[in-house]
Amino acid sequence: MSKLCKKIVLTGACGSLGMEIRETLADLADELLSVDIADAPATLLPNETFVQADVSKLDETLPLMEGATMAVHFASIPDERPFEDLLGPNFLSSYNVWEASHRHGVQRVIYASSVHAVGMVENAAGAGLDVDHAPDTFYGLAKCFAEDLGKLYWTKRGLESVHLRIFSCTKVPQNARALRTWLSFDDLRHLVDRAVQATTTGFTVIYGISNNDRAPVNNDKAAFLGYKPKDNAENWAESLMAAAAPADPSDRAQLCLGGPFATIPLGESGVAAIQAMTAPAPEEPTAEKEPDQAEDANAKKLPSFLTKKGMNP
Ligand SMILES: NC(=O)c1ccc[n+]([C@@H]2O[C@H](COP(=O)([O-])OP(=O)(O)OC[C@H]3O[C@@H](n4cnc5c(N)ncnc54)[C@H](O)[C@@H]3O)[C@@H](O)[C@H]2O)c1
């Protein structure tokens, strides 16, 4: 029996999230074409084929979309970098996926957007889906670009798109910030399934976030997709709050949706800043070192903005 889609193209298939959704997509299509610049996964699903391609190049992207019903675009560098480093993988790749989809009559693009498209919005704003773009980095700017690209191709060319503003997608919540921002792998798969199965979407944006008690955003305007997340980071609250640093009401890394991405200098890694939130505490000063010297040694390990007191989620 033929499935909902004839062919789905997944870019970034070998990445951490791509690997989590391959099976979901394969269940929805006669053929799943997995694409990545990296080598193929060790094993492929029965209806899956793999093409190694660089989607920042239009000539490599065009042939992928031939005969496709939908494109699921997850390829990118998932972190802040200098603009020039992101231009190909994060900006041009999106243009190429939309343009190739348009030329081949693809019905819908499903895009891995990010909280960092609105990362400078404060948690306390209770943001819905109509909040203005407020990128916190060049990385977030690329997500804004792709969202606007999706809107343009819908209004001018009738190509549908669903933009999943993914927050922190990990197996379990990693730090106190994730009590607000966690997206479980099961909920990611459910979200992708809904984005594919919806009969019509036009241009749609939805937050990719689990059913967290402390979720700082709401998806009311995308209720028609039928996304009903089940997991809740609150189950980890006790241990994560015990490890959290003290609150600092003047710290935008704590106040804004983007977390540490809201305070890192443009071009510097935000992922390193998030990892530092969960990293073991720097060593205590030893007897051989003066306390000042020990502090300097720690300062070298951490991005500059993290060395100020009170940094936490
Ligand atoms: N992981 C998260 O919590 C999270 C949060 C928000 C948004 N996202 C977005 O979700 C998507 C997937 O994230 P991830 O965590 O799996 O990242 P990842 O780095 O694990 O995977 C990205 C994949 O894209 C591939 N890729 C990069 N440039 C490419 C190119 N030019 N051509 C073809 N393939 C290319 C990489 O080889 C890699 O396999 C990204 O777009 C990311 O921005 C992820």
Image: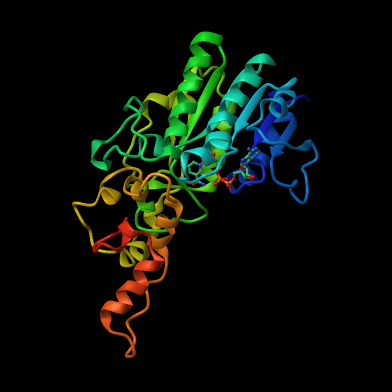
Q: Quadrant of the N terminus?
A: top right
Q: Position of residue 15 (x, y in %)?
A: 62, 46
The quadrant holding residue 297 is bottom left
Q: Is residue 164 above or below residue 174?
A: above
Closer to the camera, 3 or 279?
279
In the image, taking residue 271 as reference, residue 45 lies left or right, namely right
Left or right of 247 on screen, residue 78: right
Across and down, in percent, residue 193 comes to 58, 33
Q: Residue at x 34, y 24 (%)?
A: 130
Q: Is residue 174 above or below residue 87?
A: below
Quarter of the C terminus within the rendering: bottom left
Q: Residue furthest top?
A: 156
Q: Quadrant of ligand 1?
A: top right
Q: Residue furthest bottom?
A: 287
Whether residue 227 is visible here, answered yes or no, is: no
204 shown above or below 72: above
Residue 125 position in % (x across, y down): 24, 36
Figure quadrant of residue 198 = top right
Instruction: Classify 310 as above or below 16.
Output: below
Residue at the image position 73 percent from the left and 33 percent from the top: 32
Q: Is residue 1 left or right of residue 272?
A: right
- Front residue of 156/7: it is 156
Left or right, 62 with respect to 202, comes to right
Residue 295 visible here: yes
Of 250 and 183, nearer the camera is: 250
